[in-house]
């Protein structure tokens, strides 16, 4: 009865074997196999998850795995519209019909892209992992691929790899700049990197948006990404009918990156504007948007749960370009965009983050903590040439260091300190573009 479905699968498998792996900018995430576990590749839409699948396949090919044991299968295909979970076994049946010698004797790497469109896919993956000699990589644009759900269903048989928009290092590599191997660089190299950083600040990290041919459509493109997340990953999935409030909430979030977020104030503002919504619904919407990787929030650094609850969380976006798409970059916004860039980079490096509010009321942007307990206090400033600005930023770091005396103290900036002003002992001033290239050093 499903001969047409079987025929579509055969064609897709044949196409997959002939498909050359595209040569795209390599991502910095590890491609190493995970013994005994599948790899769930997650992240915001259009961040480059499918590209990473191809990168993993290309890495296996370079390691000597035969090409016919490297399979990519995308489920977003109108020919598979009637496919159900019980039909997923056809994929392996048709492959091994053509390669019977490989079954259970040779490891086959399967990349299943957008598999979440098939309800019940999880049981199929578990069965295949238990019965076949396979490596499985899963990727999807839907929030249904979120790590907590995959981990629950797969019962510890899956580990996540989060793919984000380009880091500055990846952005520069896509434009042909060689990695910085030393802290000593020539003036010409420095000028090239500064120009590249200006481009990164303007364009952002979404790979497609960096295409020069799409320059005039970039804002529309980025707004389209947000709309897709809003409607498909949030409204459709969670059954949110109040789209007026959801869209208004998202626009408000995207226009205030690296800023304190008070849901109570948003609720009061919406009421004054006649937008019908409850505070509880706004909190639920925020959680859904975080689950879809559109935004993330950081608490104040404190061991007191009550203090964390009474202080607002700080809001950051998946990529600073999303803010620019809804509010064109102005000089007054540059510091917020720089702070958002640093927050995203720290998350890529797996730092645990919070912000610091000192007893004097001063604020430090990040308290970054590593898994080994090492800490850094990081302050981000667009400019510090003005002496009063410089003193304010340094004062905040000095105040926070009294509460966290073991933390390394770093001031990231685009400028240099004012002449004749000495730094307090232990504070490092690092150009932000250079730190982004070597953030762990």
Image (cartoon, rainbow, N blue to C red):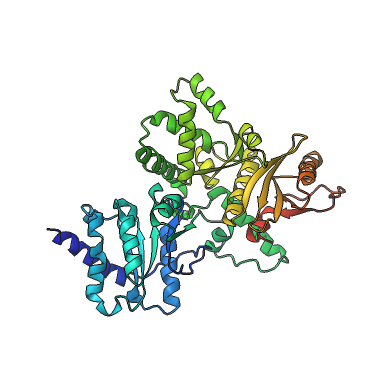
- Report the residue at 25% width, 65% height from top: 91
**What residue is at 32 percent from the left and 65 percent from the top?**
128
Lateral position of residue 67 relative to residue 13, left or right? right
Residue 268 placement (x, y as % from top left): 53, 22
Quadrant for the N terminus, please.
bottom left
Q: Position of residue 309 (x, y in %)?
A: 61, 34
Instruction: Name the side, left or right, on which 179 lies relative to 19.
Output: right
Quadrant of the rendered structure where residue 95 is? Answer: bottom left
The quadrant of the rendering that contains the C terminus is bottom right
Q: Is residue 396 above or below residue 187?
A: above
The residue furthest left is 1
Q: Residue at x 80, y 45 (%)?
A: 402
Residue 157 lies left or right of residue 379; in this view the side is left
> Front-most of 367 and 441?
367
Q: Residue 275's x, y, as percent?
A: 45, 23
- Tell me: residue 230, above or below residue 115: above
Query: Residue 15: x percent and y percent?
Result: 27, 68
Front position in the image: 72 or 417: 72
Q: Quadrant of residue 3?
A: bottom left
Callout count:
0
Image: 288 above or below 273: below
**Visible residue check, residue 94:** yes
> Image quarter for residue 115?
bottom left
Residue 336 left/right relative to 409:
left
Decide if residue 386 is in sight here. Answer: no
């Amino acid at each position: 009865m499903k001969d047409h479905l079987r025929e579509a699968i055969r064609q897709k498998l044949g196409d997959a074997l002939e498909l050359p792996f595209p040569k795209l900018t390599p991502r910095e995430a590890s491609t190493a196999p995970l013994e005994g576990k599948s790899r769930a590749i997650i992240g915001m839409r259009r961040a480059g998850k499918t590209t990473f699948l191809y990168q993993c396949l290309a890495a296996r090919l370079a390691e000597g795995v035969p090409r016919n044991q490297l399979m990519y299968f995308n489920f977003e295909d109108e020919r598979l519209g009637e496919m159900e979970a019980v039909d997923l076994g056809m994929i392996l049946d048709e492959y091994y019909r053509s390669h019977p010698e490989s079954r259970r004797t040779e490891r086959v790497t399967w990349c299943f892209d957008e598999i979440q469109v098939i309800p019940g896919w999880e049981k199929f993956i578990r069965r295949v992992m238990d019965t076949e000699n396979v490596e499985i990589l899963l990727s999807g644009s839907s929030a249904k691929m979120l790590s907590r759900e995959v981990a629950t269903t797969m019962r510890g048989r899956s580990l996540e790899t989060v793919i984000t928009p380009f880091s500055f290092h990846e952005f520069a590599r896509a434009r042909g700049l060689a990695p910085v191997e030393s802290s000593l660089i020539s003036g010409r190299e420095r000028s090239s990197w500064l120009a590249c950083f200006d481009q990164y600040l303007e364009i952002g990290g979404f790979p497609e948006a960096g295409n020069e041919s799409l320059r005039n459509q970039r804002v529309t493109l980025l707004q389209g990404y947000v709309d897709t997340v809003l409607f498909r990953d949030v409204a459709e999935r969670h059954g949110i009918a109040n789209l007026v409030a959801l869209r208004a909430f998202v626009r408000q979030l995207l226009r205030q990156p690296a800023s304190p977020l008070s849901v109570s104030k948003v609720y009061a503002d919406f009421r004054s504007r006649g937008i019908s919504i409850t505070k509880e619904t706004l909190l639920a919407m925020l959680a859904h948007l975080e689950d879809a990787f559109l935004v993330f929030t950081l608490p104040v650094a404190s061991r007191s749960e009550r203090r964390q609850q009474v202080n607002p969380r700080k809001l950051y976006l998946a990529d600073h370009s999303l803010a620019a798409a809804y509010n064109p970059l102005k000089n007054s916004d540059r510091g917020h965009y720089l702070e958002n860039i640093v927050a995203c980079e720290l998350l890529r490096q797996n730092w645990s983050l919070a912000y610091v509010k000192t007893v004097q009321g001063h604020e430090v942007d990040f308290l970054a903590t590593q898994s080994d307990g090492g800490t850094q206090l990081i302050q981000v400033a667009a400019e510090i040439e003005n002496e009063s600005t410089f003193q304010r930023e340094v004062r905040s770091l000095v105040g926070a260091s009294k509460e966290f005396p073991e933390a390394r103290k770093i001031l990231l900036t685009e400028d240099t300190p004012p002449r004749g002003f000495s730094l307090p002992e232990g504070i490092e001033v690092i150009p932000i573009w250079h730190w982004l290239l070597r953030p762990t050093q």
